[in-house]
Amino acid sequence: MGCASTMLTSSWKSEEYATYRPKNILIVGVTQNTIARMKYEERLKNEFNKRGINASQSSLIFEESFKGSKQTEEDIDQQVNKLLDRGYETILISAVRGVDERVSYSEGIPRAYWGVWRFGRRYYLYQDVYFEPGYYTKYKVYHIETSIYDIKSETEKSLVWVGSYDLVNPNDVDYSVNRYVNAVVRSLEDEGMIPRNYQ
C-alpha cells in the first residue's frame, strides 16, 4: 500500500451528449488543499492543451472574492454568465465526496512461495496467519467525483458525464495528482470526448 492507486468505480454519460466534444473548458478542483488543487488543475489543463482543447484553471480565473467565501446559487449563476461571456462552454469539476480509513493485513508469506499450488504446502504456509501474527497497515481511500457540464444549456439536463474514482493511499501530492489526472484522461478518451494523445 506504499503508492497511491486510482480506480474508476462507476461512470455515466448522457445520451443527449453522445457526440459532445469540449472546445473551451474550465477545470475546477474543489478541495481545501490549495497546492493539490492548483497542481491538479494545471496538470489536467496541460493534458487538454496537448489535444488541441483550450483549457484554463479556475484557480487563475475565479476572483479571490469568489474562491474565498461560500457562494449562493445566484452568485454561481452570475459567475457562469461571466464564463460564457469569455467563451467557455464546458466546466469540469472534481470534488472529494468522502474518505474511508481501511486496514490491510499482511501475513508475510515470502514471494518465493507464491508459486506454490499444492494445497498441503499452501495450507502449511498459511498457518502462520494463526501462529505468527503479521501486521496491520492503516490506509485511506478518497472517493472523488469528476463531472462535466455544458454550461450553455439552460435546462436541468446539462450534465454531460460523471465518473467516480477511488484514490487509494494518496500520501504524495504530485504522484497522487498524476495518477488521478491519468485516470480521468483515460476515461474521457474511452468515452470519445477527447482525442488520444500518441506523443
Image (cartoon, helix red, strand yellow):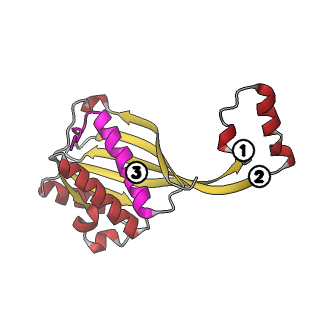
Question: How far across and down, in percent of the image, does residue 65 sit?
Answer: 29, 74
- Residue lying at 27% horizontally and 40% vertically, measured from the top left: 155
- Residue lying at 82% horizontally and 35% vertically, measured from the top left: 124
Q: Are marks 3 and 2 in contact (CB under 8 Å)?
A: no
Residue 57 painted magenta: no
Could you tell me if residue 26 is visible in this image? no
Q: Secondary structure at mark 2?
A: loop
Q: Quadrant of the C terminus?
A: top left
Mark 3 surroundings: few (<14), some (14-19) or many (≥20) residues within 10 A: many
Residue 17 position by quadrant? top left
Left or right for 107, reference 138: right
Magenta-highlighted residues: 173-199
Kindly identify which residue carries mark 3: 180
Establish if 132 lies above or below 76: above
**Nearer the observer, disc 1 or disc 3?**
1
Left or right for 47, reference 30: left
Q: Amino acid at mark 2?
A: Gly
The residue most toward the front is 112
Q: Secondary structure at mark 1?
A: loop
- Residue lying at 33% horizontally and 65% vertically, measured from the top left: 38
Q: Amino acid at mark 1?
A: Ile
Kindly identify which residue carries mark 1: 109
Mark 1 surroundings: few (<14), some (14-19) or many (≥20) residues within 10 A: few
Kindly identify which residue carries mark 2: 134
Q: Earlier in the sequence, mark 2 or mark 1?
A: 1
Establish if 184 lies above or below 72: above
Could you tell me if residue 27 is visible in this image? yes
Q: Alpha-carbon distance for marks 1 and 3?
A: 31 Å
Decide whether the magenta segment is chiefly helix, strand or loop: helix
